[in-house]
Amino acid sequence: MPVPLFFLFLLIAPLVELYLLIQVGSVIGALPTILLSIFTAVLGAGLVRMEGLSVLFRVQQTLARREVPALEMMEGAVLLVAGVLLFFPGFITDTVGFLLLVPQVRRWLILVLLRRGGAMVQSERGGRIRVIEGEFRRDGD
């Protein structure tokens, strides 16, 4: 996302969230709207913790197999974003945050981002190859 679009998003997103909070508050009342916002934050924190422990367990299993837990680490980063989104009051951020808590949605998003970034390519036989770019050096040569 280019920088000007990102700043435009940072300007418009809170205004849309505020508008929706006011609209919902006018329908169900101010106190229920505040309590609903607090409830989603508390529920989200618990779900992020559970999903985070699940990802941590998968990281440990991957490391025990002597593999690099690249996708699992990226899932942890997406869970961090989900937690931040659930912390902020608002229905749009809560919806996106709760969607990011669904493992299938997280994996799909990560794979889409990896393909767009060129880090994952399709093999000639149709199977997926995980390519993680980086540098290395040999010590002792």
Image (cartoon, rainbow, N blue to C red):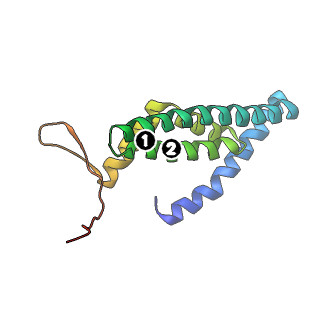
Judged from this view, the residue extending furthest toward the left is 125
Amino acid type, residue under disc 1 in the picture: Glu
Q: Is residue 106 above or below residue 121?
A: above
Q: Residue at x 71, y 37 (%)?
A: 41
Q: Is residue 61 left or right of residue 8?
A: left
Residue linked to disc 1: 72
Q: Characterize the local packing of mark 2: few (<14), some (14-19) or many (20 or more) Cα atoms within 10 angstroms.
A: many
Name the residue nearer the viewer: 57 or 7.
57
Q: Is residue 99 above or below residue 87?
A: above
SS category of the residue bearing label 2? helix
Q: Residue at x 44, y 35 (%)?
A: 58
Q: Is residue 21 above or below residue 113?
A: above
Disc 1 versus disc 2: distance between alpha carbons?
A: 6 Å
Q: Give yes or no for contact between labels 1 and 2 (Cβ–Cβ under 8 Å).
A: yes
Q: Characterize the local packing of mark 1: few (<14), some (14-19) or many (20 or more) Cα atoms within 10 angstroms.
A: many
Residue linked to disc 2: 76
